[in-house]
Image (spheres, grey):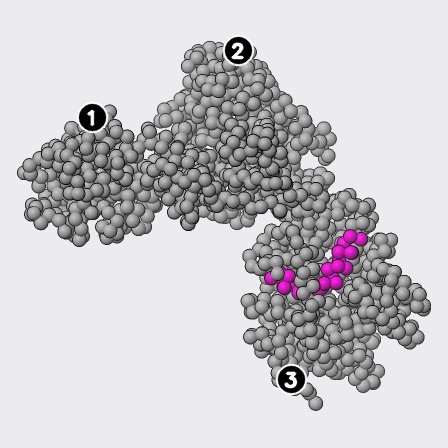
Amino acid sequence: MIDYATFREQVAEYLGTDTLLQDVNLMDQGLDSMRAMNLALEWEAEGIPLDFADLAESPTLLGLWTLVEERQGS
Amino acid sequence: MTRFSPTPFPLAEAQEGLFYAQLLDPANPVFNTGQYLDLVGELDIAALSRAVAQAGVEAEALRLRVRSTGGQLVRDDLRIDLQVIDCTAADDPEQFALLLIRADMATTVDPAHDPLARQRLYRLAPQRHLWAQQVHHLAIDGYGMVLLTARVAELYGRYLAGQETGGRALAPLAGVLAEDAVYRTSPERVGDAAWWRDYLHGMADVTGMAPGRAVSSHSFIRTEAALPDDVRLALLDRAKSARLGWPDVLMALTAAYCRRFTGGEEAVVGVPHMGRMGSATARVPAMVMNVLPLRIASGELLPLDSYLAQVADNLAQVRRHGRYRSEQVRRDLGLIGGDRRLYGPLINVQPYDRPPRMAGLQVGLHVTGTGPVDDIHFTFRGDGRSTLSIEVDANPALYDAAAVQAHGLRLATFLQAALRAERLGDVPTATPEEARSELGRFNDTAHPVSAVTLVQLLEEAFRTHRDAVALRLAGMDLTYAELDRQTRALAAALQARGVGPEIIVAVALPRSLALVVALVAVLRAGGVYLPLDLEHPAERIATIVAGAQPAVVLAEDDPHGVYGAALLRPVDWPDAGEPQACAAVPGNAAYVIYTSGSTGAPKGVVVEHRAIVNRLLWMAEQYSIAGSDRILLKTPATFDVSVWEFFLPLIRGATLVVAPPEAHRDPVALARLIRAEGITIMHFVPSMLAAFLAAPESDGLAIARTFTSGEELPADLRDRFHRRIRGELHNLYGPTEAAVDVSYWPAGPDDESRPVPIGHPVWNTRLLVLDDSLRPVPQGMAGQLFIGGVQLARGYLGRPDLTAERFVADPSHPGERLYATGDLARRRNDGAIEFLGRADHQVKIRGLRIELGEIEAAIADTGLASAAVVLVRGERLAAWLVPAAGYGEAALRAALGRRLPAYMVPAAIVPLAAMPVTVNGKLDRRALPEPDFASEGGAAPATRTERRLAELFAAVLEHGGPLAAGDDFFALGGHSLSAVDLLLRIREEWGHDPGLATLFEVADIRGLAARIDGAAEADHGVGPLIVLARGAESPLFMVHPAGGLSWGYRTLATSLRPARAVYGLQAPALDAGVAAPESLERLAHDYAHRVDRAVPDGPVHLAGWSVGGVIAQGVAAALQDMGREVGLLALLDAYPADCWRAEPEPTEAQALRALLAIAGLDPEAHPELTTREQVTGFLRGSDSPLGSLPPAVLDGVVRVVLDNNRLVRGHHHRRFAGTLTHIRAGLDHAHKPQLVPSSWGAYAGAVECLTVPFLHPQLTGPEASALIAPLLSERMARFSPVSA
């Protein structure tokens, strides 16, 4: 289980920034498909079944957190 | 139930590149992408079939039809069903299935007609199946294949569980197309375009990891291996500690590996980019991916983590602009066509690519193809946490299977070491085994050579072969006994002047007997010889002499006043004398040869006896040199190739044939010398070989062994050699610093190597290809070539600093040295070494070794520039400089001309306000303006010779604009072959040419014209035999008309097709010193002998106009008497002597007026010219070439003209047994009925009469020649060509 703070920190680390906006497309904040892939793999390793396409379809911080929360429960 | 989509839509940008590539190569199956899953366990085939079918319905791209006009549509009539193929009955079901899978992949798919996708299930056993998917690249990319597979797996699970179709369906293609259309016209795309242009600004030419053109073949070579677990875990650790994603770390390290092979400061690798961020493309199987060029600067010396972070940041940036197609980038940068590329090796990290989970099955993933492989692809598949594999796919046109496999193994080893390294620079490229091969197997050259000096070898030969011919010069023989006597005498004299071991004797003599005697005598005295080039500027010679302090200088004279009391002239050499036994030992120096030095002064390379003895004995044994060999000496003594030319024959009892001083510059003379002297061994610098082969005379020569060295031997030149010359060709390599040559390669007719290697090391010699840290590099990788072993020079005379710089300690052989050649090289898999160019600023221009630093230093020394850089552009030197006080180009050129040989003076000089520098403060070479070689501008050609030469330059170079007198032939784009063409035309124009070597040194119009005029003072093209045209066909000799000159035949001679060697016979009496011939019979006899000497065998043809025809008939008869075959005998409007005897003798005035006609003027227009003075004065003022003759020669012409009537009237013809072809001037002779061709009937076996509609004086003009040349050509073609 990860909480929002951990989740946000992971994303921020991948993007190399501390200032992440919640509802702005992460692509505009430096997320590319390779980084998205890596994030998906990392979460999957922590037991959250997310794949790249899920991330690619909801590329905002809020959108992703919604997914993560949802999948953590399943 | 199915949607129908009849409206075609355009290709997405991502599809366009593939579409055109497939269109260009429609039979190429490499556009098939595919994979198969190895399914072990209970498979529900019905469920899988249903899942595949449903996925096929969802994935529209699989049903695309792509029309050859570029539009596409989705076929709703098509179903992509799973075909089940039962292989259980096969002997080896798995192999059988794989065979079928491979066959499918190798089958071309026509996107306009065939389904783009294929789904097949191979049943190997009840519990084992291979599920193979194959989709044309136009319809899918790597991630698309993952999506498709995952969807089938998901559906399979649902159906197996009794659920209905559901889950996350694949998305329609429309989303991809809409996104593509939006991007195409978006401002974002404009921004991306600008970003890429900026990012790639200043990028050098992109190269791959192996030489050759990167165009995908029809297949690729694959090697795959799992990355060892410890490497995978080390990767995860390093990524974690560097706070980077492991795919980026893997990318950065693999790129560093690639950069070591592509060479240069920077590599550009291709990075596949999924380009699927955003909802529209996230779930669409389609072709979306892009390949991004990633610039990788050398990070060898950075802390590794800094390098990794740099690359990761670089990757993030390029990915941000990853939607912009690389095909478009190529168009933007003009990188289209030829060898121009945007990126080299491709590095693909695919963490998502892992086997899908399928209920109840163990699944293994095998990728069978990912599309075209232009160069080499390194693909990593797996999630990293549990698995990671390396796949290397390579283009078979560029790599062989062994090289691909080696890359796979070596990369794994490299990654393992790099992941633990502090910096990349500490990581070797070669595996330990490869390093051992470089030091051992490839350099296994130990061979016993006795500890003797060159003098001992020579004296042994003098004892053994006393009566053999040691030397031939100008047809004269010198025996070993005689050479022994002369060299003893001089050696004694040298010893009397203090010469002994380590004492230098300078030798400044032209190629002659004296030169050979001098060199041998210096060695026998125990001394060290130092050759000086007579043509070098005084300052350069003075510098060398001051540095070397020779005890004696053997020279004809002391033109620059630098030798002083040391001068010993050949006339003062004693005739007899007995030296003391040579005191030199193998460790003493034998010779010093100076080469260009980067510090501004030439440097003297000191070579010891044991080094040159090893080299000579190796060559003698390798090529079985025997007493019967005849070795040509034609290389200047200042060039170290001459060392074996001089001494190889003399230690083996063979004959040294000394080429006359100018012969080596003239392909015709050289070919004749080779034939006449039966040369068995000789040497060419490749550019001179190219020029030699271009001359028709070299065709069909037989030379047992020809050696090339001094510059790269182009593969095409090797092949051309074997088409023209019978004999072996050997490519040698070596710097002056290692006793002439250290490697050899037999470049025989069956050698197909491209490039031609420099080959393998000679005896007792190591050739090592090392990196900057002196570590061996693997085969296939470029490194610097180092030489070790017995042949190394002692060092540079009086310059321990320079010696220490280039002769370094050998890390693998303690106590021994390696010479750093500065040459880049690569070892082939078979161990042979390929030369790749220079690592530093030493260059070779037309075979001459040049240190650019020496020129820069010379410019600095003039004080006329505050900064200067010299570079090679094309095949020419250019200098950029910042002028200092007093600068002027002419002043600078003059100052350089005093210090440097002519070939080292830059062809273009560009003054700049300041040198452009990069941000790092380094010279920015790319920012230097292109030098203008086109035309120097300046003074127009002034003299008659300069003007005519300018026309010839323009014709040969196809140069349109006006040329200046200072324009340089090579600077204008001339090369070795066009140089030969130019010389042929110069010879046609002036009857002689200054030779290739002269042209290489003096290539501007003014300088060359001066050489032509200078030579003309001695030879005005009035020699007894001149070359009128060149060609391979059997030769035609044209006899001069009344004036004694054959120049008038030039147009006719060059109009013959095919091109034919045409010589002009000219009257010897043009020379005032030669008496007039006693009779025409005698003259014809002399001419016949001259023809026989010039062309010793095969048929010859004869022709002559007017009086020339009368003489030609006599020559033909004389040749027949000598047993020579006469082919064509053509008489241009000539009539037998009998017709003239009855005529009154013309007056002197009439004869003189005939001279006007000879000069191409109309005599009738100038009735006022009656005396010798008037006529010659008039000619001198005219444009006729006769007017440019010096008075003595013009007098000769007048004398010959006046003597003709006596000769013709006194002549009595003898019979020529063959056919006489007569060409009558049909518009003439109305008043001279006695002039009929049939009057020749009494003097020829047969007479063939032809008529052309011209007047007698017009017969050699261009219009008549156009008619007559084909008549002659056709008749000469009936005779067999000269046999070689």
The quarter of the picture where residue B218 lies is bottom right
Q: Is residue A71 above or below residue B705?
A: below
Which residue was labeled with disc 1? Answer: B1075
Farthest residue to the front: give it.
B885
Give the chain letter at badge 1.
B
- Residues tagged 2 and 3 counted as in contact (Cβ below 8 A): no
Instruction: Provide residue B443's location: percent of width, then percent of height.
Output: 65, 38
Residue B497 badge: 2
Instruction: Give neighbour class at mark 1: few <14, some 14-19, many 20+ (Cα, 10 Å).
Output: few
- Rounded to the nearest angstrom, the CA distance separating label 1 from label 2 is 51 Å
Q: Is residue B576 visible?
A: yes
Left or right: B214 in relation to B153? left
Identified at 73% across, 39% down, the residue is: B773
Q: Is residue B290 visible?
A: no
Q: Is residue B249 above or below residue B742?
A: below
Instruction: Provide residue B1016's location: percent of width, then percent of height.
Output: 33, 32
Sequence-first tag of 1 and 2 = 2
- Give the residue type that dot 1 points to: Ala
Farthest residue to the left: give it.
B1142
- Rounded to the nearest angstrom, the CA distance separating label 3 from label 1 is 102 Å
The quarter of the picture where residue B172 lies is bottom right
Which residue was labeled with disc 3? Answer: B5
Residue B998 badge: none
Residue B1033 within the magenta-colored segment of the rendering? no
Is disc 1 placed on a helix, strand or loop? loop
Q: Is residue B429 above or below residue B557?
A: below
State the predominant SS element of the stretch in magenta: helix
Tell me which segment is drawn in magenta. Answer: B309-331
Instruction: Select label 2 or label 3 by which is in front.
Output: 3
Left or right: B613 in relation to B234? left
